[in-house]
Every structure is written in C-alpha cells, then in structure tokens.
Image (tube, grey):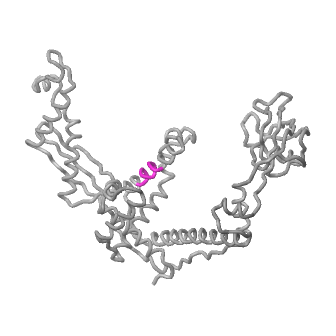
Amino acid sequence: MKNVHEIEIEIKGSEWTKILDTTFTKKNKDLKVDGFRKGKCPKNIYLQKFGIESLYMDAVDAAAGSAYTKALTDNDLLPVCEPKMDVKEIDKDHVKFVFTIITRPEIKLGKYKNLGIKKDEVKVSKKEIDEEIARLSSRFAEIVVKENGTVLEGNTAVIDFEGIVDGKPLDGGIGANYPLEIGSHTFIPGFEEGLVGMSVGETKELKLKFPENYTKELANKEVTFKVTVREIKERVLPELNKDFYADLGYENIETEEEFRKEVKQALTERKNEEAKNKYLDDVLDAASKNIEVELNPEIIDDEVHRMLNQFGEQLKMQGLSLDQYLQFTGATQEDIHKQMEPEAIKRVKYRYLIEEVANAEKIEITDEEAEKESANMAANYGMEKTEFLSRFGGLDIVKYDMRMRKALEILSQEDQK
C-alpha cells in the first residue's frame, strides 16, 4: 500500500558510543559486583563480566525515540497510528532501526451533497404528551400503604412466601416481608400474576413451573409457592397543579393547558434534535459509502484500541475493570476487538470523510478565530485559556476541531445545492 513507509535509521560512531556509555552509567548505579562498592564497577570489568550485549536492550530503548523522530522529519511523514519498529542490526559500533510508518491513506471524496436523504418530520401526538406527563408525574409519586382493596398491576405487595419442589423446601425459595412490585417480572412467570386480586392477610398456593431456560436442576420442574400478602402499597401520583408545575421548574405555569403546551414544546425540541442527529448520521453513512479509501489493518486496530480504552474508562465509572468485565461475560479481549471492528471502520471512514469535506469546501480557521474559541471554551470549563490549551492539546487542535464542526454543519444542511 502506498501509505506504508519502511524507513531505515542508523545511529553510529560517537553518537552510539555516547548512548552505550549513558546506558552503562545508569545500569552501574544500582549494580553490586564482587570487589567493588555498589555503583563503582569500572566499565572494562563490567564488560568482561557481562559483555557489551547486556547494554543493547536499554540502549535501543534510549535511542528509539530520537531515531523515530529523525525518520519522520527526514521523510516529512505524519503517522496516523503507532509504528512498527525492528532492530535490523546492532553491535558496539552502530544500531540500525527499521520503522514501518503508516500515513494517511489516499482518499477520493465522492458525492456528499444532494443525497436524497430527508430529515424525519417531527410531530408530537396527544398520546406522547400524556405519556411524558405520566413520566414526569411518576418522578414525584408517593408510595403509600393501600388501606383497602386488592393487589393490582403496579402495586407493591409485601409478602411471605415458601417454595416446595419434589415435596421439599426450595433452596433459597423462602422469604418474609419481601416487597414485590407487580409487573417487575422479578419472579418466575405466573407468580406475580397469581398475586393480582389478593387481599391483605390472604394466603394462596400458586402451582407453577420453572421455565426451560432456568437452572439445569430446576428447568421445567413443577413448584408450589405458598404466599401470604402482609401489606399492599401503591404509587399515588401528584395532582396537576401550580405546586407540581413549580417542582418541575415551571414557576409561571398555573393551568394544565399551559403545562401541556410547555410539555409539547419540550418534546418538540427534543424530537427536533433527535431528527437532526439522525439526519446527520444518515448523511454520514451515505456519503462515507461514496468515498474511495483502502484502510490498513493497523489503522483499524489503532481505532479499536482507542475504543477499548474509552470502554475501559466507562467501566471504571461503574466500578469495574476491563478484566472483571471479561470474567463476568466470559468474553476475551479478542472477542471484544472483533465486535468493535465494524464500528471502528465506520468511525475512521467518517473522520476521513469530514476531513475531505473540509478540504473540498476550503474551510480555514484563523488564529484569531481559534484564540476566541479557546477563550470561550476555557470560560465554559472554568479555567484560564493557557491551562485549557495545554489540556486540550494546543491551538492547532482547536483549529482542527472548529474545522471539523464547520464541515459537519455543511453536511447537515438540508436541500444542499
């Protein structure tokens, strides 16, 4: 592939000798050789005892960084993923590195305007408004003891229960004062349904069967549960009044009609944003299929590793490590890698597409524009501009980010001409 570059870099003579000497000094610092104090072994004695070859590994590590930089600068290369490095030759006089460097592949931008994609029309129905009001109301619902009546769907039944299988108590199948929300499907099929209609103090036997996909010992087995209802609780929704509207942040709303208008407006804005995002994703998907690019496996692997790191950070926020996740799921890193590959390919193609659109549209960002944007972003994060730029990666990264956003704005325009 044209974007794969094999570059040889040789370090020799006094430069290599200096690296070997520095490596020896570092290794000798903590070395204890019979007849000499720690760190005081002469170099000639060290070489006689351990050989100069013992310095090569650390010396290669010390030399690799500058050799790689030289490979890039001498050949004017900008890598897009981690390079591969091999040591072709090494002795006391020189070391020769071979770097395999992958640069951005050649990309041919296809059609990205007038793709015949329409943004979804946004409508908000009365049913959606009712459902949203119900959802908002449920946030402020109060759980109260139901003084009269029977267990209904959505109620919480506080129960004592005991399971019997093959004439013996079911292991783990006994509970007292257990709060069970009817409709939560916590228990096996038929259990919660069997409680509907029961009153406080009532005892009932439920003759059920464990499902096929249950544990091997109990799958398809018949079970009898003796259940007594001790208490029934129900969710009481708040009244739609001024106090409720104020709790939601609508201080100036007084009537249900006004409230419904606000809910409709909020739903419309949300659905408009969703439709906009879906439209952009549809455009990116269609336009990315029109570009011509051959992706190196290394580029895809690099993106997968980036995604794995992000996934690992998300797991950390949930108190899990990636290793723990793999243990729980029984998956391997190779399994996760393979699963992530299609998404990685899509991400890389989208990125190259957006960059090419920015080039085609001749989008340029001035230093002044980037400085202004940096100041605004720094203010949003509550930090000084210099600190923000240091953390964000510098002004060039801000320029790149602004350039990509402007390209996305062009891609997201409807009825493009």
- Magenta includes 306? yes
In depth, the one of 58 and 334 nearer the eye is: 58
Q: Quadrant of residue 271?
A: bottom right
- Magenta includes 216? no
Position of 347 relative to 20 (above/below):
below
Q: Position of residue 3 (x, y in %)?
A: 30, 61
In depth, the one of 100 and 268 nearer the eye is: 268
Query: Residue at image x 22%, y 50%?
Result: 68
Q: Position of residue 177 (x, y in %)?
A: 80, 36
Position of 108 relative to 148 (above/below):
below
In depth, the one of 381 and 327 nearer the eye is: 381
Query: Residue at image x 36%, y 66%?
Result: 373
Q: Quadrant of residue 381?
A: bottom left
> In the displayed image of the protein, which residue is found farthest to the bottom?
417
Q: Position of residue 18 (x, y in %)?
A: 11, 39
Query: Residue at image x 15%, y 47%?
Result: 10
Left-right relation of 172 to 399: right
> In the displayed image of the protein, which residue is found farthest to the top?
35
Magenta span: 303-310
